[in-house]
Image (spheres, helix red, strand yellow):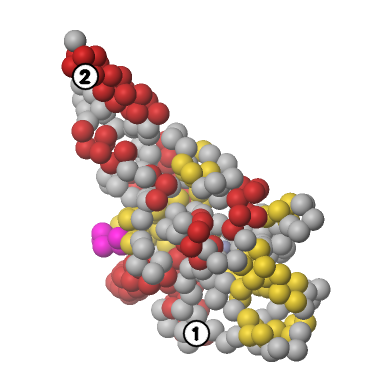
Amino acid sequence: MKKQLLIIGIIILLVCVGFSGCFEKKTNDGKIDEETIVSQSKEICNESHYKMAFLLIENANNTATQNDIELINLLKTNASERFSWATKNLASLDTKDEVSVMSMEGNPSYQEIANNFYEKHEDTYDFLTIYVTYNDSNNMYHYLVKNQIQGIGLSIFNNSDSYGSKGKLIGINWMKDIDMDVEYYERFNHSIKLGVNAILHETSHQWGAYVDFIDENGQRSNSLRNPYNMAHWDKKLETGYDLLDGYSWRDNGNGTFTAKVTDFMQGYSQLDLYLMGLMSKDEVSPLKLINSTSDTKYMDVGTTISGSIRTISIQQIIDVAGNRTCICI
Ligand SMILES: [Zn+2]
């Protein structure tokens, strides 16, 4: 009898775990498959292996060239390597699949492109990165498709249906005209680094920069973020030249600070790694923000400003956003 009760108990527990989990995949007869149970029972908040598809949209007047495809191949290989480096090998980005060249007329939206893509591709990608062959008036942008992480300053939502994904897709990078990239690299002579920064910068908007903190006076403050573009870290925040901005500062020891020279090899700060779920809150050192009246709008590398260091703990961020945790949707 005891054994029967135990078995019934386990079944009830499994059902409860099942319904409180993120089950989306079922077998044809409606049962939840074993593979799903195993994968869903892992810490979904600490996802660290991402897969990205690269799309190149052409039209009749601007067909994709071999050069375009080769450049994207170079960018995607480098993006994968840099992502591992940027995350201190705590995460990976699989970009191995071939570039998908798609012919579409009339300036298709990212949503139309995604829906078109999923008509012929499996729902195995976390991110889609889209280039086009024609002049495009939009800015580079990251579209959040789904967020199930609480504690990073974003609401919880899942719009994957409207993009043709059954739930795997979390974000889309809009990278504009591939020819613009070629001209840009040649003009600034920074080879492929800037193109890789651009891909990873847009991808990073999946997690930031959206958090505020409680300041010394108990008030909510948004000073970690750039006042001219609130989804990026403020230049006065020491981030070691993070993929989501922020600068790296030299303390001159006389109440002034100089923005260091950068080699454009941007990575992730501890704060980003925390927001991405790759570092625990205990591993994040206090953040350093320069308290200064200097305006950051046109501030560039090499600038010297006067001010003082203000430290902010990860707990002050958690006091606004709450603990980092995942919500099943
Ligand atoms: Zn950005």
According to the picture, the residue beneath numbered tag 1 turns out to be 263
According to the picture, the residue beneath numbered tag 2 turns out to be 7
Q: Does the residue labelled 1 lie within 8 Å of ligand 1?
A: no
Residue at 42%, 83% in the rendered image: 191
Figure quarter occupied by ligand 1: bottom right
Q: Give the range drawn in magenta.
A: 94-99
Residue at 51%, 38% in the rendered image: 157
Dominant SS type (magenta): loop
Which amino acid, by three-letter code, is at mark 2? Ile
Q: Position of residue 288 (x, y in %)?
A: 64, 71
Residue at 54%, 46% in the rendered image: 323
- Is residue 96 covered in magenta? yes
- Look at the picture and state if 65 lies above or below 142: below
Q: Quadrant of the C terminus?
A: top left
Q: Does the residue labelled 2 lie within 8 Å of ligand 1?
A: no
Measured Cα–Cα span from mark 2 to mark 1: 61 Å
Residue at 37%, 51% in the rendered image: 47
Q: Quadrant of the N terminus?
A: top left
Which amino acid, by three-letter code, is at mark 1? Asp
